[in-house]
Amino acid sequence: MEGFVDETTIEVSSGHGGAGCVSFRREKFVPFGGPDGGDGGRGGDIIFQVKHNLKTLAHLRMKRVFHAQNGLPGGGSRMHGKDGHSVYVSVPPGTLVHDKETGELLHDFSESNQNSWVLLTGGRGGQGNWHFRSSKHQAPRHAQPGMPGEARTLRVELNMIADLGFVGFPNAGKSTLLTLLTNATPKVAPYPFTTKIPNLGVMRIYDRDVVLADIPGILEGASHGHGLGIQFLKHIARTKGLIFLIDLSDDDFLGAFPKLLTELKEFSEELVDKPRLILGTKTDLDEEGTRYEELKASLPGETLLGLSSFRREDLDSIRNAFLLLADHEPLS
């Protein structure tokens, strides 16, 4: 998958608190000084932090175990033990954190504006014997142990965040269109299955950014395990709309859209109900325009536009249509 990882399991644990100290003041001419044992330091936290330059969870597959530092014990002269260092777990935007044992969703970074989140707090440090002095117990010889940290096994999942998602069979022109409209540079070649991983690009139009997602082409029967595309449909599950690309040079161009809808419906009814736009691609190979008109006649009620990536025609109209779809405006 060329290093693309969208799900992995990690183990995390916060640090234990340091023990309180049993100590008595010893100074010249003060042979029987009072208790002066200091408190233990607090254990370090486990903190998740969003890094916008990350696009995958591959780094978490390389390092699966994260332990925050324990707090250090207290010392004499009421010296406080040093707090343990916290550990930061970096994740890309759109990350979901689940408890592996229960399946509970603990945090969803795709629905939160937070860039950091404390999952586990470190254990509190124990109090030194200085705290336990009293008129009856002027020389307490006990202190508190530090509190233990917490540990959890997590399933971390990535849902890439985009406004619009491209859907089509292999070699329908999705990656080429992404290259033309955005700053993305996906691999493009004149044969199927060039795209092996999802790609994101940002289309700048007027004063707006519209994020586009290109996923691997869907094969007929994908919902039953054929091909790569069905694995990545979850990455367009949260898009505002879908762009269906139909290759007009394919002999089965009239059957492509119904087959794509069937595969999406098998995966999720919600995908089928999203606002959508249909692009008839490779219009330069349909010189008379007969296939485009046939496709339009076969899809009453659907919004259809033509595209020639080779001639780069009608790109402004397509950009505007994409913007309207991202804003949930009716397409005419």
Image (cartoon, grey):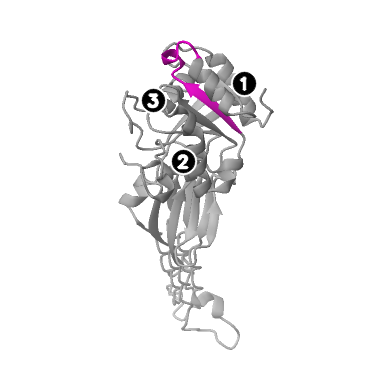
Q: Which residue is at 52% across, 15% downward?
A: 315
Residue 68, magenta (yes or no) = no
Instruction: Give the residue displayed 51% in from the left and 73% down from the top.
Output: 127
Element under label 3?
loop
Does residue 171 appear in this view? Answer: yes
Q: Which residues are magenta?
A: 276-289
Which amino acid, mark 3?
Answer: Thr
Q: Nearer the viewer, mark 3 or mark 1?
A: 3
User: Residue furthest toward the bottom?
Assistant: 136
Residue neighbourhood size for the residue with mark 3, other residues' Cα within 10 Å, grouped as few (<14), some (14–19), many (≥20): some
**Disc 2 element:** loop
Kindly report the distance in space between the C-alpha atoms of the residues bearing marks 2 and 3.
21 Å
Q: Amino acid at mark 1?
A: Asp
Q: Is residue 305 above or below residue 148?
A: above
Mark 2 and mark 3 lie on one chain; the one further toward the N terminus is: 2
Instruction: Give the residue pinned by disc 3.
Output: 185
Could you tell me the amino acid type at mark 2? Lys
- Residue under numbered circle 1: 207
Which residue is disc 2 drawn over? 51
Q: Is the residue 319 above or below the residue 272 in the image?
A: above
Q: Is residue 177 above or below residue 316?
A: below
Q: Position of residue 131 (x, y in %)?
A: 55, 76
Task: Give SS at disc 1.
Answer: loop
Quadrant occupied by the C terminus: top right
Q: Give left or right: position of 193 versus 126.
A: left
